[in-house]
Image (cartoon, rainbow, N blue to C red):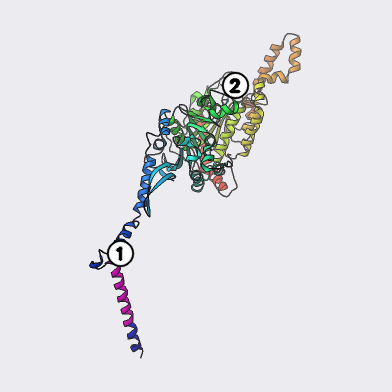
């Protein structure tokens, strides 16, 4: 019974399958006598209008737009102006700074396109104005970085030639991927222009939407490195100044809040050019920009060098390199580099270059805050921050600008996990009317805040003087202190010059009455110099150890080795769990 019922069902299913197959075949191949009918022509035309299955039309559009963006228009007035100013074009800059053939663009076809319809479902681009912020990823001496660079030839980098969302996206991407950001600024970097109002048909409230992400990067220790390779205006100026490190090209760089025409209308200062308003002699001398470079090529080299000392983020230790300079190398010349006569000067930078790895010293801010010296170097291949005082300027007394420079360097080292080695010869904070008018104590206290709020390890080598509040702050910023002294060390509340006059005022006045002031002053000075013998301080354990200056490198390298092998591992663990939260901004 069951078998009889199954047979009709099977035949029916087979017949249905055959019918369906015939229907499909009829759609694929029409009979020959119907090929010339109007209906067939209509179907053929419809087939021609179908979009290609391999998306070659879209790929072709992308290729066209990328080709336009990759080649400059020699007839474009912006490009002509760029070349007349002696500046590289944006794509040429990318080739110069990154390792060859490593750039991967983000937003390669962002910009303004004019389309022409070529078929009911097809179109082609007939003109394309690319975004004037070219961004992407690439390698910088083998290190992956994110790169953002302005195209000044398109609307001078103003917002109506750029995609704001593109800029914000890259800032967010740096945080997500923990990648360093390199910014080549030439223009306003997407800043405002009055023509935007005309274009949009309404005015807008100004928002700097990228800055919250920039501040987060700075505090996370994600390196932000900027170069001024043209006029950095408004938002462009703010972007590069906010970086951990910035450099300006002397031949083409300038930086200002607003250009000469805007300044003329607001302050009536006429006839200003870019250099007068904000050239290197302005902003590399006042600390707005850290370093000066001769040209674009030197700017890019400085960026490469600085990145070599820094980790990808504060979650990592700074990158170490192999070192051929022996860690126990001695330098007998250091024994006599400090003059026995306290009033005489010496070159503090020669001490730095003698102690650190050969050719590893990179100074930051050499042209401003010149009472202080700061920068980066290596000890046995391990990156460290370097702090010193410059006795050749103002006797080494720390002024407002010097305090500002050291404050910035301390915060940089703290977010980048860079141990600090400092060579101390500080007579105190600067004094006098100029010091008071420039708020020396205000900025000196800010330096103190930086010393006591940062937590990166600090090692001090006392080369000569440590006096006053400034000396106490720099020396006592860690507990317990990590320090050694040279035989030339001298310390106290006040230097003897002036200190004897204050402490023995009455006695010297009495001696003056009988014509013996100079004689008595000399007696007192000789007594104090005898009592200030550093060995006496060591007898009282006021200084833990006095070393032979020739052994300074060996001592400092030993300290750096322990920091990297033990202390930095603990520090990274504390940062990972949120126990440590350094702040640069």
Is there any visible trace of residue 198 in the rendered image?
Answer: yes
Q: Main secondary structure of the magenta part?
A: helix
First to last magenta residue range: 11-28
Query: Disc number at residue 39?
Result: 1
Mark 2 neighbour class, 10 Å CA radius: few under 14, some 14 to 19, many 20 or more: few
Q: Nearer the viewer, residue 84 or 185?
A: 84
Q: Is residue 354 left or right of residue 505?
A: left
Residue 77, x across and y down, in percent = 41, 32
Mark number displayed over residue 80: none
Toward the left, the furthest residue is 32
At mark 2, the secondary structure is: helix
Task: Decide which of 367, 264 is in the foreground and name it.
Answer: 264
Q: Residue 151, percent across and down?
A: 44, 37
C-alpha distance separating marks 2 and 1:
97 Å
Is residue 16 one of those drawn in magenta?
yes
Residue at 53% over, 27% down: 260
Per the rendering, the mark at residue 394 is 2
Element on which disc 1 rests:
helix
- The picture places residue 416, in percent across and down from the top left corner, at 53, 40
Please say whether residue 108 is visible from this viewpoint: no
User: To which quarter of the image does residue 31 belong?
Assistant: bottom left
Q: Nearer the viewer, residue 416 or 79?
A: 79
Identify whether 340 is placed above or below 125: above
Would you say the residues marked 2 and 1 are in contact, meaning their CB atoms lie under 8 Å apart? no
User: Could you say which is closer to the camera, residue 423 or residue 404?
Assistant: 404
Which residue reaches farthest bottom? 1
Left or right of residue 113: residue 38 = left
Rendered-image quadrant of the C terminus:
top right
* Residue 302 shown left or right of residue 514 in the figure: left
């Amino acid at each position: 019974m069951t078998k009889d019922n199954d047979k009709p069902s099977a035949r029916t299913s087979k017949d249905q399958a055959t019918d369906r197959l015939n229907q499909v075949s009829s759609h694929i191949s029409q009979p020959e006598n119907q090929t010339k009918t109007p209906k067939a022509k209509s179907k053929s035309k419809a087939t021609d209008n179908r979009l290609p299955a391999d998306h070659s039309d879209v790929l072709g559009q992308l290729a066209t737009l990328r080709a336009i963006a990759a080649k400059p228009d020699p007839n474009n007035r912006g490009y002509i102006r760029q070349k007349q100013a002696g500046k590289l074009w944006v794509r040429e800059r990318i080739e110069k700074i990154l390792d060859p053939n490593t750039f991967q663009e983000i937003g390669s076809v962002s910009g303004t396109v004019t389309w022409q319809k070529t078929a009911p479902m097809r179109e082609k681009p007939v003109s394309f104005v690319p975004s004037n912020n070219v961004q992407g990823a690439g390698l910088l001496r083998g290190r992956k970085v994110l790169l953002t660079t302005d195209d000044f030839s398109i609307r001078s980098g103003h917002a109506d030639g750029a995609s704001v969302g593109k800029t914000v996206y890259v800032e967010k991407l740096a945080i997500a991927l923990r990648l360093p950001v390199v910014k080549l600024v030439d223009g306003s970097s997407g800043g405002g222009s009055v023509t935007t109002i005309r274009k949009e048909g309404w005015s807008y409230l100004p928002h700097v939407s990228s800055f919250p992400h920039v501040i987060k990067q700075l505090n996370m220790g994600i390196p932000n490195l900027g170069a001024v390779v043209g006029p950095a205006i408004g938002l462009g100026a703010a972007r590069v100044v906010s970086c951990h490190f910035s450099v300006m090209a002397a031949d083409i760089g300038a930086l200002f809040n607003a250009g000469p025409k805007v300044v003329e209308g607001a302050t009536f200062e006429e006839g200003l050019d870019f250099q007068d308003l904000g050239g290197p002699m302005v902003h590399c001398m006042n600390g707005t920009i850290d370093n000066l470079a001769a040209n674009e090529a030197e700017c890019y080299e400085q960026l490469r060098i600085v990145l070599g000392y820094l980790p990808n983020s504060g979650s990592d230790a700074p990158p170490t390199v192999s070192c051929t300079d022996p860690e126990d190398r001695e330098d007998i010349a250091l024994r006599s580099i400090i003059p026995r006569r306290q009033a005489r000067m010496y070159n503090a930078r020669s001490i730095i270059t003698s102690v650190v790895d050969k050719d590893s010293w990179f100074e930051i801010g050499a042209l401003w805050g010149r009472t202080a010296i700061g920068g980066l170097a290596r000890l046995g291949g391990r990156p460290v921050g370097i702090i010193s005082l410059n006795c050749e300027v103002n006797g080494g007394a720390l002024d407002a600008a010097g305090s500002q420079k050291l404050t910035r360097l301390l915060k940089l080292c703290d977010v980048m996990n860079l141990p600090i080695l400092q060579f101390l010869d500080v007579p105190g904070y600067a004094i006098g009317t100029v010091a008071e008018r420039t708020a020396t104590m205000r900025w000196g206290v800010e330096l103190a805040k930086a010393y006591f709020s940062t937590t990166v390890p600090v090692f001090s080598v006392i080369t000569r003087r440590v006096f006053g509040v400034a000396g106490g702050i720099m020396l006592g910023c860690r507990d317990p202190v990590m320090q050694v002294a040279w035989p030339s060390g001298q310390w106290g509340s006040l230097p003897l010059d002036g200190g004897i006059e204050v402490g023995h005022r009455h006695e010297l006045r009495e001696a003056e009455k009988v014509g013996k002031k100079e004689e008595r002053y000399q007696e007192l000075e000789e007594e104090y110099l005898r009592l200030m013998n550093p060995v006496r301080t060591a007898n009282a354990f006021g200084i833990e150890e006095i070393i032979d200056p020739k052994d300074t490198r060996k001592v400092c390298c030993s300290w750096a080795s322990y920091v990297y092998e033990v202390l930095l591992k603990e520090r990274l663990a504390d940062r990972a769990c949120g126990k440590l939260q350094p702040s640069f901004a």
